[in-house]
């Protein structure tokens, strides 16, 4: 490519080029996730508890916020981070085989929900500057406008809401 001569591409052991992040590739992965799992803005999407699901949940949130709801990239970034934190809590602390992701929008607000089969309530812990874990709910508490937990007959729904500027 013109102007990139002499810049070496990162390579994994064995000389295989390392794939770099690309908006086009990420967009394609998000669209694939949407086709495979469904749209969490239309119905609850059930994801298996496995390492790949965190990326899938983030991609689904990103594509709904950016493309379906036409909201800004900063809001998409914040929502993907917070969903990732809720997903991490659900996976680490519940032992669930799967969890549900749902997104809702109403005038001036968006709401993201993560359902898991445990009725154990999440706990907002005090966070110290050098803590390496335990920051998930702290981030949700700081970044979201509102958050909470709804107990269900079989499990719970942890949610957060963000204010949005609706287009007229």
Image (tube, grey):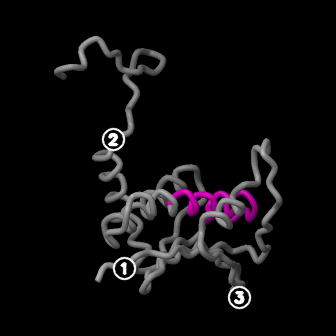
Q: Residue at x 53, y 73 (%)?
A: 162
Q: Position of 79 compared to 168: left or right?
A: right
Question: Local crowd at mark 1 within 10 Å, few (<14), some, or many (≥20)?
Answer: few
Q: Residue at x 58, y 61 (%)?
A: 82
Residue 93: image quadrant is: bottom right
In this figure, which residue is indicated by the disc labeled 1?
166
In this figure, which residue is indicated by the disc labeled 2?
22
In this figure, which residue is indicated by the disc labeled 3?
153
Label annotation for residue 148 = none
Query: x, y percentage for residue 11?
Result: 42, 20
Quarter containing the N terminus: top left
Question: Local crowd at mark 2 within 10 Å, few (<14), some, or many (≥20)?
Answer: few
Q: Secondary structure at mark 2?
A: loop
Please state the extent of the stretch shown in magenta in the rendering.
80-98
Closer to viewer: mark 3 or mark 2: 2
- Mark 2 or mark 1: name the one nearer the start of the chain: 2
- Mark 3 or mark 2: name the one nearer the start of the chain: 2
Q: Secondary structure at mark 1?
A: loop
Instruction: State the CA–CA distance, disc 3 to disc 1.
Output: 34 Å
Q: Secondary structure at mark 3?
A: loop
């Amino acid at each position: 490519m013109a102007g990139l001569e002499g810049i070496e591409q990162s390579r994994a052991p064995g000389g295989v080029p390392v794939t770099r992040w690309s908006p086009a590739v990420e967009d394609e992965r998000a669209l694939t996730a949407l086709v495979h799992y469904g749209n969490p803005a239309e119905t609850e999407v059930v994801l298996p508890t496995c390492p790949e699901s965190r990326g899938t949940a983030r991609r689904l949130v990103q594509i709904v916020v950016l493309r379906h709801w036409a909201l800004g990239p900063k809001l998409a970034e914040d929502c993907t981070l917070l969903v990732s934190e809720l997903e991490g809590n659900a996976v680490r602390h519940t032992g669930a085989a799967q969890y549900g992701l749902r997104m809702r929008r109403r005038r001036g607000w968006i709401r993201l929900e993560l359902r898991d089969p445990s009725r154990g309530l999440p706990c907002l812990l005090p966070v110290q500057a050098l803590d390496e874990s335990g920051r998930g709910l702290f981030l949700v508490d700081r970044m979201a406008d509102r958050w909470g937990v709804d107990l269900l007959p079989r499990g719970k729904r942890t949610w957060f809401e963000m204010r949005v500027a609706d287009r007229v």
